[in-house]
Image: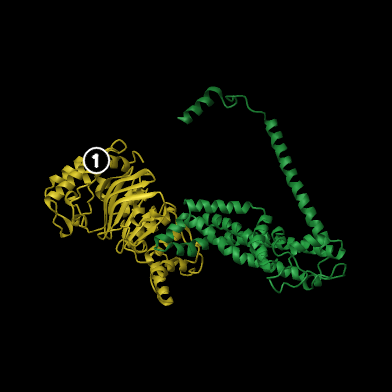
Chain colours: A yellow, B green
Amino acid sequence: MNEASSKSRPAGGQRAEPRPPEGSAADAREGEAAVRPPVPSVGNGAAESAAGPRASKGGEAREGSAGGTDASADARAGRAPAPATEELPAKISVQSLDFWYGDRQVLFGNDLDVAERKVTAIIGPSGCGKSTHIRVYNRMFELYRDQRAAGDILLDGENLLDPDMDLIDLRRRVGMIFQRPTPFPMSVYENVAYGLRLHYRVSRKQLDERVERTLRGAALWDEVKDKLDEPGTALSGGQQQRLCIARAIAVEPEVLLMDEPTSAVDPVATAKLEELIESLKSEFTIVIVTHNMQQAARISDFTAFFFKGYVVEFGPTERIFTNPREKKTEDYITGRFG
Amino acid sequence: MSRGAADAVVTTRGRDAPPFPLKSRARRRARNLGLKVAASAAALFALFFLFWILAVVVKRGIAALDWSFFTSLPSPPGGEGGGLANAILGTVAMTLMAALIGTPLGVLTGVYLSEFGKGTRFGSLVRFTVNVMLGIPSILAGLFVYTLLVVTTGHFSGWAGGVSLAVLILPNVARTTEDMLGLVPDSLRESSLALGAPRWKTTVGVVFRAARSGLATGILLAVARISGETAPLLFTALNSPYWPRNLGRPTANLTVTIFSYAMSPYSDWQRLAWGASLLITVSVLVVTLLTRWRVREGEA
């Protein structure tokens, strides 16, 4: 186990300035200590330092001093060290993400590295900011006037919160599945073709092939091949959700965000969806928000535990579930609250 | 906790001893009955007049409806026979014109209110304006267009009639559109946007589709409503005994015809007025029933 030394922030290391303003931000957060739950803290920071010179990922040799500042800033801010994605390259690297609904701050300095082609689960009690967190990844929150995010989220090293980021391109790359199935009011076929037509010039024949392949990929083809012309809303709940997944993967995204995708379907459909998620992992980077801890344990490679807007603990799923470092995580996992 | 307390009540006092004296059952029943009777009576009262009006209109109107009613011009005062073909055409033409002008504007206004102007100052202003327009008496719409198009051109015209009806249909359609689009869940919009669809594509391709049945219903009902308007036409299209060949001239229409023929001393004209009343009533009724039926089909 070398989570402690596995800080992987490829792009973070490339920053020109060694994050000097961190101190002030950290101080600002200190003011909120009262509302903050007992979060990871000096313990982790210390462990990290004790691990000695850190092996930076991506061949980026960090300056010792810069690293040191970083670590102490982390410790002071009481943030969980983001890493834990072992040797894997981070597809998405969230760095000190804050989020507000109007004047109310709901996410506090979230750090998280999402490993490429792995399933990262986000667990935590209701209202702790899980959905809010992933809705920043595709900037869905911007639909609503009073919602605001601050911080950096690097998608392959590029800050997706940058106002210059093309939203349509971002959303083609980062797809999303919602809590309730949301088939469009059109046929099964058209549902899948919708996104394809949006982004690609395709002939009818290519479209037909693509729709079939996508539906097969979403493990739905056998069930709907005879009703491609029927409305998508006529399918069962589980089928509708798989249709939504098909619709999302049809545009060839790199990342799939899933916001409690199985909460509105029955157990059999849930099992099918989980199987599907497992199989999608080879092609897509998946971030799944779930209320169901067994589900997180079953399907995810990494797990982040959220509490009151903080990333309390983040690491390989197996470790989080068998040997959590934080008392809060342990309490939640063992069902003592939540 | 609460269960414990309930248990305590049961065990210490038993089920037969309520904590307080019970309210009188007889009085509750009497009150219930009283309200039921009052509500039913009010409904019957309203229905009675509705059916009375319908019965009279049908009885007197049906006598007027013959082939020539739909095919020929009105006879000269005191003459026999004749029909209201010109008025039927004129009403259809002006209603269509109003629908063609007012519906696109109204739908776009509704789209703005529901999809883009939500929570903005300008959006609230537009919504307020639409609500005020909805409450404006139709005769004011007529007067407005009178000063705008009749005074300036120097004569009454079918165009002015169509525009005055458009002024009336616009806020109706805008409101219906906003309401219907508002019923479409945000999750559907988000799903489309999350696929990388631009806003307009989401609105046209997904939100409109989801709301199409309600939209069609609302628009048809709005059209049916303006087809029975009289006051705005009185100041704009006026009326005419001739075929509506040129909408730049005063144009015949059913409602103003009813107004003037019903007041006339000639029994034949009065008969035509009854016929026109029946025609309008039945048309509006049919459109309403059709849309209701459509809605029910859509739900199924």
Nearest to the observer: residue A269 or residue B92: B92
Marked residue chain, label 1: A
Nearest to the observer: residue A48 or residue B263: B263
| Percent of width and height locating residue A148 | 36, 50
Which residue position holds label 1?
A27
Nearest to the observer: residue A235 or residue A298: A235
Left or right of B29? Residue A95 is left
Quarter of the image that includes the N terminus of chain B: top left
| Percent of width and height locating residue B58 | 80, 60
Left or right of B274? Residue B187 is left
| Percent of width and height locating residue B113 | 51, 55
Residue at 47% x, 66% y: name it: A188
- Mark 1 Cα-neighbour bin, 10 Å: few <14, some 14–19, many ≥20: few
| Percent of width and height locating residue B165 | 65, 61
Residue at 51% x, 65% y: name it: A231
From what the image shows, is residue A302 above or below residue B251? Answer: above
Mark 1, secondary structure of its residue: helix
Amino acid on which the number 1 mark rests in the picture: Asp
Left or right of A113? Residue B160 is right
Quarter of the image that includes the C terminus of chain B: bottom right
Left or right of A142? Residue B32 is right
Q: Would residue B291 be visible to someone looking at this image?
A: no
